[in-house]
Amino acid sequence: MAVRVSSKIWRDYLYNKVKSGGFGATRHWSSAAQTPTAPPPKKIPHSSKKGRLFTGAAIGLLIAGGAYVSTVDEATFCGWLFSATKLVNPFFALLDAEVAHRLAVSAAARGLVPREKRPDPSILGLEVWGRKFSNPVGLAAGFDKNAEAVEGLLGLGFGFVEVGSVTPVPQEGNPKPRIFRLRHEGAIINRCGFNSEGIFAVAKRLGIQHGKRKLAETSSTSSSSKDEVKHGGKAGPGILGVNLGKNKTSEDAAADYVQGVHSLSQYADYLVINVSSPNTPGLRKLQGRKQLKDLVKKVQGARDEMQWGEEGPPPLLVKIAPDLSKEDLEDIAAVSLALRLDGLIISNTTISRPDSVRQNPVAEESGGLSGKPLFNLSTNMLKEMYVLTRGRIPLIGCGGISSGEDAYKKIRAGATLVQLYTQFAYEGPALIPQIKAELAEYLERDGFKSIHEAVGADCR
């Protein structure tokens, strides 16, 4: 968290630390005269001298750091914090992929990540489904599967964060190892298989977060606080999506998704039916025309039968695979238009292995491929779906985004919002402000005044 420290506070802190011996000082103070008295002469070991030199250097760095913090503005310091996160990337690269992922989620959950204090460029703001997004850049499902770090992740500056996939009953997922890096190709293969703590654990966490948000709304009195709440969602400064999955052993997929709606929809700004993971047997069959139509109708019915306030029920989206045929896409588009689906996420991971990764031995691992090699496949599919739905359904472009230029290409191909995951796993928090700044530059360069103006520009 970026905190501006005044020079006076810093000086007082250093004075008190030295006076109390907090920095390893060896002076002795007389309680009567409050003047220093020399300690008995003592030979100082060589190692102790090194320790004092180190302590002196540390104090010098503290003083220099304090001076810096006390003079820079909050935005500059915030930028410095995000840039500083690059220093830990080499450490995470040395760890097992799933261990590194676990540590990253834990750090975000404990607030050990920078918090974005700088406002987003106004050109990035947009409204979708009646919800206001400060920017269109989101974090895809799969990173925070159990909604452990929603507040910390939204605080990083994402316009929205999607948690899950969440299954009704807790399940371990597939055996480990199940996440594999293809670092040179900027890709990851995973076969996690919906490892989830289950609906009730996630509902409990989201309920606490939702309660905090409601308290913030009722206690805010200044106009600035009200504006902040207005532009946020149910969980914080950004929008929260909840991605629903089915249990591996479940024979009634629709019942699993309906249970997810009943338990979690009250905490979500939007809901996602995930029928596209390649790691749950039979799941992708639900993308067929009849199967998808029956499933969506049941889930929509479960959502609509619940009691909702003035804001109405959360939008319902479907996340689809990138490995579909033209006929599959036509069927999905027809179902989406007929049932007035609120949106589609394009796309999940691919079971294919593009030429750019085939030479890597890791590519032989089974599972879904994400990252840079997925970009062209998912973007071409995004463009097709935008044309098939005639731009009537908001699309979220996901797959291979690693820069502001990539995000811009997704938007021009038909995406209203975009999501990333793999490159965020590699580069960390510093990637987020970089993408937003680059995206704003591309929009302004081409004369667009808003995101909405750019959506589908390459399809017109």
Image (spheres, grey):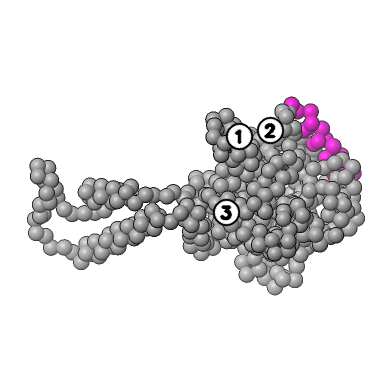
Horizontal side of residue 36 vs 410, given as left or right: left
Q: Which of 330 and 430 is in front in this view?
A: 430
Compute the Cα span from label 3 to label 1.
Answer: 25 Å
Q: Residue at x 85, y 41 (%)?
A: 340
Point out which mark residue 101 bears.
Answer: 3
Q: Is mark 1 on a helix, strand or loop?
A: helix
Q: Nearer the viewer, mark 3 or mark 1?
A: 1
In the image, residue 296 lies in the stretch drawn in magenta: yes
Q: Would residue 46 be seen by someone viewing this image from the given angle?
A: yes
User: SS class of the residue under badge 2?
Assistant: helix
Question: Residue 4 at what x, y percent from top left?
Answer: 42, 50
Judge left or right: residue 68 versus residue 184: left
Label whose residue precedes the other's in the sequence (3 or 1): 3
Question: Quadrant of the rendered structure where residue 347 is?
Answer: bottom right
Q: Which amino acid does label 2 sit on?
A: Gln
Residue carrying label 2: 266
Q: From what the image shows, is residue 170 above or below residue 99?
A: above
Q: Mark 3 or 2, which is nearer the eye?
A: 2
Highlighted magenta segment, given as a residue range? 290-307
Is there a contact, CB below 8 Å, between mark 1 and mark 2? yes
Other residues around mark 3 within 10 Å, as few (<14) / some (14–19) / many (≥20): some
Q: Where is residue 377 in the image (x, y as percent from the top left)?
A: 78, 63
- Determine the CA span between mark 1 and mark 2: 9 Å
Image quarter for residue 40? bottom left
Residue wearing tag 1:
210
